[in-house]
Image: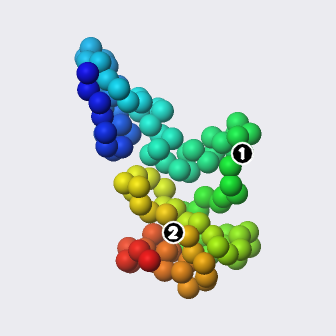
């Protein structure tokens, strides 16, 4: 029996590969691992299935993030880069300055607040 611990191999489909080779595996397949691998995927799924979840906006650029923040959310606001972050990558910004620092890290490669 193989128990896959890290998220990345699950998202990459290791459990599916091992199952196909006849190896017993504890862990989700690639399709189910998307729930952990992409918070955007999970939020979109919740919206489509009418599963209650906090409000959100998916953005692809810093400008889109700033526009969404200005027009949609007040403080505090939670920002999360999509994808695996090993349990990190979430910022709860209490102010515009903290949100700007989070956007620096997410879009410009700066240091996370």
Is residue 63 visible to us here? no
Vertical placement of residue 68 versus 3, above or below: below
Q: Secondary structure at mark 1?
A: loop
Is residue 24 visible to us here? yes
- Among the two numbered marks 2 and 1 on one chain, the one whose residue lies closer to the N terminus: 1
Q: Residue furthest top?
A: 22
Going 44% across and 37% down the picture, which residue do you hit? 33
Q: Is residue 33 left or right of residue 50?
A: left
Going 29% across and 18% down the picture, which residue do you hit? 24
Vertical placement of residue 50 versus 109, above or below: above
Q: Give the quarter of the image for residue 76.
A: bottom right
- Cβ atoms at labels 2 and 1 below 8 Å apart: no
**10, 25: nearer the viewer:** 25
Q: Position of residue 98 (x, y in %)?
A: 54, 81
- In which quadrant will I find the N terminus? top left
The residue carrying mark 1 is: 52
Q: Position of residue 53 (x, y in %)?
A: 68, 49
Q: Give the quarter of the image for residue 60.
A: bottom right
Q: Position of residue 75 (x, y in %)?
A: 67, 75
Vertical placement of residue 113 versus 38, above or below: below
- In which quadrant will I find the C terminus? bottom left
Vertical placement of residue 28 versus 112, above or below: above
Q: Is residue 47 left or right of residue 30?
A: right
Going 71% across and 74% down the picture, which residue do you hit? 74
Going 61% across and 58% down the picture, which residue do you hit? 58
Give the numbered dot on residue 91.
Answer: 2
Q: CA distance from mark 2 to mark 1?
A: 21 Å
Q: Is residue 12 left or right of residue 53?
A: left
Crowd band around label 2 with a 10 angstrom C-alpha radius: few (<14), some (14–19), many (20+): some
Q: Secondary structure at mark 2?
A: strand
Q: Position of residue 91 (x, y in %)?
A: 51, 69
């Amino acid at each position: 029996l193989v128990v896959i611990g890290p998220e990345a191999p699950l998202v990459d489909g290791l459990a599916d590969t091992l199952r196909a080779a006849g190896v017993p595996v504890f862990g989700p397949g690639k399709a189910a691992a998307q729930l952990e691998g992409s918070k955007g995927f999970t939020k979109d799924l919740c919206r489509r299935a009418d599963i209650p979840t906090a409000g959100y906006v998916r953005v692809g650029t810093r400008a889109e993030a700033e526009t969404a923040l200005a027009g949609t959310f007040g403080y505090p606001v939670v920002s999360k880069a999509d994808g695996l972050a090993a349990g990190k990558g979430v910022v709860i910004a209490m102010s515009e300055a903290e949100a700007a620092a989070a956007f620096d890290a997410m879009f410009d490669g700066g240091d996370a607040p």
